[in-house]
Image: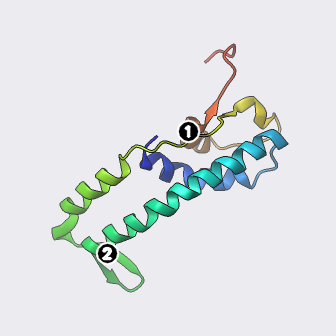
């Protein structure tokens, strides 16, 4: 998993964690969120430093200066393509039950954390 996957999963995990999940899936989801939040707490300050280094504050928003865009992009890519090793128990799609409604974008963002039964066709 890369740091980019962490960012992609964050909003989807928030949305799904608010759903009424079966207890086993809820347990796995809470444990996963706790582990990812620890990593996010390390990465987010580094992201902020990049914005401060290459940007300027305009009102309440930091915008990257035109002359710094390439340097910012290079360091940003270095950060987001860094590998993370997070030990977690995958959530089986079947554990979510049939009553839970999940948006396709959320399934796409969370596919690294989910698995399905092997006998199920694609």
Q: Quadrant of the C terminus?
A: top right
Residue at 22%, 64% in the rendered image? 69
Secondary structure under the numbered disc 2 in the rendered image: helix
Above or below residue 112? Residue 5 is below
Q: Secondary structure at mark 1?
A: helix
Q: Can you tell which quarter of the image residue 50 is in?
A: bottom left
On the picture, is 68 further left or further right than 22? left
Q: Position of residue 60 (x, y in %)?
A: 42, 83
| Residue 13, image x, y percentages | 63, 51
78 or 20: which is nearer to us? Answer: 78
Return the residue found at the far bottom: 59
Q: Residues within 10 Å of mark 2 (few under 14, many from 20)?
A: some
Q: Which mark is residue 108?
A: 1
Nearer to us in this view, 69 or 47: 47
Residue at position x 19%, y 68% in the image: 68
- Measure the alpha-carbon separation of dots 2 and 1: 31 Å
Q: Does residue 56 sit above or below 25 in this rendering?
A: below
Q: State left or right for residue 109 relative to residue 101.
A: left
- Residue 68, compared with residue 8, is above or below; it is below
Circle 2/circle 1 CB separation < 8 Å: no
Q: Quadrant of residue 62?
A: bottom left
Observer able to see residue 27: yes
Residue beneath disc 2: 52
Q: Residue at x 25, y 62 (%)?
A: 72
């Amino acid at each position: 998993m890369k740091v980019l996957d962490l960012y992609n999963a964050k909003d989807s995990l928030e949305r799904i964690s608010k759903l009424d999940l079966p207890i086993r899936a809820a347990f796995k989801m809470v444990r996963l969120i706790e582990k990812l939040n620890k990593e996010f707490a390390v990465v987010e300050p580094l992201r902020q430093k990049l914005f401060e280094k290459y940007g300027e504050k305009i009102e309440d928003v930091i915008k990257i200066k035109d002359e710094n865009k390439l340097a910012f992009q290079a360091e940003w890519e270095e950060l987001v393509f860094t590998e993370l090793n997070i030990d977690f128990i995958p959530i089986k799609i079947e554990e979510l039950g049939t009553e839970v409604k999940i948006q396709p974008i959320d399934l796409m963002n969370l596919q690294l954390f989910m698995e399905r039964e092997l006998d199920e066709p694609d």
